[in-house]
Image (cartoon, rainbow, N blue to C red):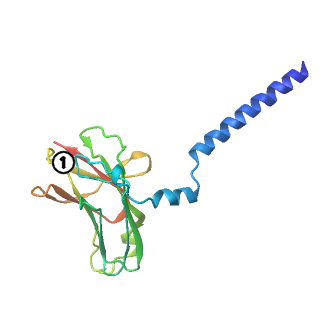
Amino acid sequence: MNKKMILLAVAIGVIIGVGIFVFLRQTYVSPEQQLLTTQQLPNPQQNTATSAGGFNYDEIIKARISSKGGVLQNADGSVIVTIPPLSKDIDFTISFKRSDYKVSSGTASPVTIKIYPDVDLMAIGVSSASSPIPIEIKAKYDKQYNLMVPYLIHGKGRLSAVDLGSIDRKNNSFTMQTFHGGDYSWIYVN
């Protein structure tokens, strides 16, 4: 009877160990795999048009921003990020993903814009230090809606409102203003 209990305990231990190994293997992404994933080239076959514009969710835009400032823009011009002059050179990346955050009212935008690194401009200083200049994120919007409320999305889907700089109803675009990187999107309100 002791041998049977020992064999049963070993079998259960092996099954649990294999299960944990398989689970961790499926959910763990090594730094090398992350690098390969984030450096994918745009795939034209995956360019999915949304009601907010023709976003290519695989598109990645990179630029070094210096004391002259700079602009990062996706291929179809539906998102334009203007970064003010900086006190030191920083490599920025703009990428996109489908929005998956929950809203209690209104309609969530189909796209989230990621500005990396999540650097705080107030901490590093902008070169025209007399008055801080925000990052401006200009995005196309769905013209069936009257108002966009832009948000910074924190880890776990918590939303914090950011400044709505302007709305250009003629060109169906609006501008968000912020002083740091991160994930940005908006909610449509009528």
User: Where is 30 relative to 63, above or below?
Assistant: above
- Quadrant hosting residue 188: top left
Q: Amino acid at mark 1?
A: Asp
- Quadrant hosting residue 162: bottom left
* x and y, in percent, of residue 43 in the image: 38, 55
Look at the image and tell me in which quarter the C terminus lies.
top left
Tell whether 149 sits left or right of 58.
left
Look at the image and tell me in which quarter the N terminus lies.
top right
Tell whether 25 sits left or right of 189.
right
> Farthest right residue?
2
Q: Nearer the viewer, residue 102 or 33?
A: 33
Residue occupying image coordinates x 24% and y 62%? 77
Q: Residues within 10 Å of mark 1 (few under 14, many from 20)?
A: some
* x and y, in percent, of residue 39 in the image: 46, 61
> Farthest front residue?
45
> Farthest top residue?
1
How many numbered marks, from 0 up?
Answer: 1
Q: Nearer the viewer, residue 165 or 168?
A: 168
User: Where is 120 relative to 182, above or below?
Assistant: below
* x and y, in percent, of residue 61 in the image: 36, 65
User: Where is 161 relative to 6, above or below?
Assistant: below
> Farthest left residue?
170
User: Where is 62 relative to 26, above or below?
Assistant: below
Q: Which residue is mark 1?
A: 142
* x and y, in percent, of residue 96 in the image: 36, 55
Tell whether 110 sits left or right of 5.
left
Residue occupying image coordinates x 14% and y 44%? 144
Q: Nearer the viewer, residue 33 or 184?
A: 33
Tell me the SS state at disc 1.
loop
Residue occupying image coordinates x 15% and y 54%? 172
